[in-house]
Amino acid sequence: MNELLWLGMLGTNFLAILLAYRLFGKLGLYIWIPIAAIVANIQVVKYVELVGMTATLGNIVYASSFLVTDILSENYGRREANRAVAVGFASLIAMVVLMNLALLFEPHPTDEAHPHLSAIFSLMPRITLASLVAYVVSQYHDVWAYSFWRRKLPGAQRIWIRNNLSTLVSQLIDSIVFALAAFYGVVPWRVLLEIIVTTYVLKAIVAAADTPLVYLASRWQRKGLVSDETGP
């Protein structure tokens, strides 16, 4: 059942990104980045079993941000992709500060939400710190690598090479850095290694599956089918 839900979430994320890009253009991609960063950091506190191994949720949503930066790199250049990374970074900082400030308020005697919010968001400082480090290192590497391979391997027919060479390495960096920073000393080593392996494998599947979407987004942009507003 979890595997089917995982595939359903994958399709939902891909569809949401395509709709955001088709309807709102570059702005839609910028909007998706903080959505992915925040949702992934909430989902990651939940452990599930996938194909017999321990994994954390949030992999699909977070991995989708690499698809967004690859589309931005392909269609608009490295500067715009780096700008999206900065937006995601700022959104993570804002979330952890605002939610932990909210936890400082003394709840009303009739309040039932505080224990649940505390259970989730009191974990966020370490999770978010780990995510921030992994996010900055892996995302900026992805943007740099995509730009590098775009210069070395130009042409629309080679998008799949650029997309996979940049994203697969970046996802490996992200998986190792995040898992060690977030879960070292919290879970047994066996579980930690399972999280690293399953996290990377799942993200690699997302990276391979999203390649046709980069082609599609590139085609939409070339044909002028994207609602980009250039302004005055």
Image (tube, grey):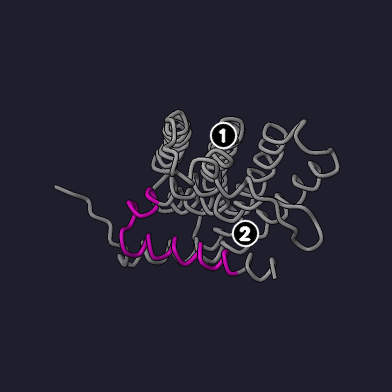
Q: What stretch is highlighted in magenta?
A: 8-31
Q: Quadrant of residue 138?
A: top right
Q: Residue at x 63, y 64 (%)?
A: 6
Q: Which residue in the rendered view is the most extreme toward the front?
A: 109
Q: Residue at x 32, y 51 (%)?
A: 27
Q: Position of residue 185 (x, y in %)?
A: 77, 30
Q: Is residue 158 left or right of residue 175?
A: left
Q: Position of residue 159 (x, y in %)?
A: 54, 58
Three-letter amino acid code at the position of disc 2: Val
Q: How crowded is mark 1: few (under 14 residues within 10 Å), some or many (20 or more)?
A: some
Q: Main secondary structure of the magenta part?
A: helix
Helix, strand or loop at disc 2?
helix
Q: Vertical placement of 83 versus 165: above or below?
A: above
Q: In this rendered view, identify the residue nearer to me: 167 or 1.
A: 1
Helix, strand or loop at disc 1?
loop
Q: Quadrant of residue 172?
A: top right
Q: Is residue 24 located in the magenta-colored stretch of the structure?
A: yes
Q: Is residue 131 located in the magenta-colored stretch of the structure?
A: no
Q: Residue at x 84, y 38 (%)?
A: 189
Mark 2 or mark 1: which comes first in sequence? 1
Q: In this rendered view, identify the residue nearer to me: 10 or 207.
A: 10
Mark number displayed over residue 206? 2
Q: Residue at x 49, y 40 (%)?
A: 114
Q: Distance between the residues labelled 2 and 1?
A: 29 Å
Q: Is residue 176 left or right of residue 213?
A: right
Q: Identify residue for label 1.
A: 122
Three-letter amino acid code at the position of disc 1: Ser
Q: Which residue in the rendered view is the most extreme toward the right?
A: 190
Nearer mark to the viewer, of 2 and 1: 1
Report if the CB atoms under discs 2 and 1 are less than 8 Å apart: no
Q: Vertical placement of 168 versus 119: above or below?
A: below
